[in-house]
Amino acid sequence: MSTVSAQVTDAVTQSNVKVVGEAPAMAMGSVYQTAAHSTGLMFENAVHAQNNQNVLSQTATTMGVIQIYSIDTIADAIAIAEMLQAAP
């Protein structure tokens, strides 16, 4: 039967204690990193949604202006169509 040196068992024990002692800090670091990444994605999605809303607002404004400017044209077209129908 062979005996193991007390220095070897002490070194192994200290290594195991070090790993077990660092585990909670490593876990919390991972949690914080995940939370920061999720928050970053949330802000990216918010900026993208805001940009899309801005494009939709500009499109709606442009379509409204086009309709406002085309009222006279439509009225003229209706008047001409009525004149053509009334002609003998």
Image (cartoon, rainbow, N blue to C red):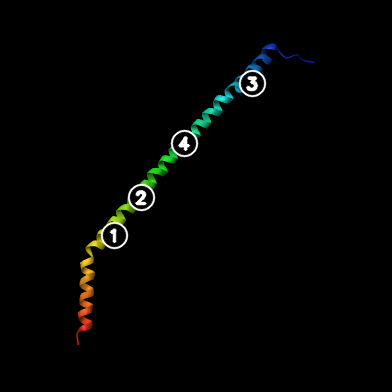
- Residue at point 57%, 22% (across, down): 22
What is the total number of numbered labels drawn onto the structure image? 4
- Residue at point 26%, 63% (across, down): 67
The residue type indicated by label 3 comes to: Asn
The residue type indicated by label 1 comes to: Met
Q: Earlier in the sequence, mark 2 or mark 1?
A: 2
Give percent across and percent down for residue 60. Answer: 31, 56
User: Which residue is identified by label 3?
Assistant: 16
Question: What is the CA distance from the residue labelled 4 to the residue labelled 2?
Answer: 24 Å
In the image shown, does 69 or 23 lie closer to the viewer? 69
Give percent across and percent down for residue 33. Answer: 49, 32
When asked about the image quadrant of residue 18, the answer is top right
Give percent across and percent down for residue 1. Answer: 80, 15
Q: Residue furthest right?
A: 1
Other-residue count near label 4 (Cα within 10 Å), few / some / many at <14 / 14–19 / ≥20: few
Of labels 3 and 2, the one closer to you: 2
Other-residue count near label 3 (Cα within 10 Å), few / some / many at <14 / 14–19 / ≥20: few
* Label 4 with label 1: CB-CB less than 8 Å: no
**For residue 14, side relative to residue 48 (left or right):** right
When asked about the image quadrant of residue 42, the answer is top left
Q: Earlier in the sequence, mark 1 or mark 3?
A: 3
* Label 3 with label 4: CB-CB less than 8 Å: no
Q: Secondary structure at mark 2?
A: helix
Q: Earlier in the sequence, mark 4 or mark 1?
A: 4
User: Which residue is identified by label 2?
Assistant: 53
Q: Earlier in the sequence, mark 3 or mark 4?
A: 3
Q: Earlier in the sequence, mark 4 or mark 2?
A: 4
Quadrant of the drawing holding the C terminus: bottom left
* Label 2 with label 1: CB-CB less than 8 Å: no
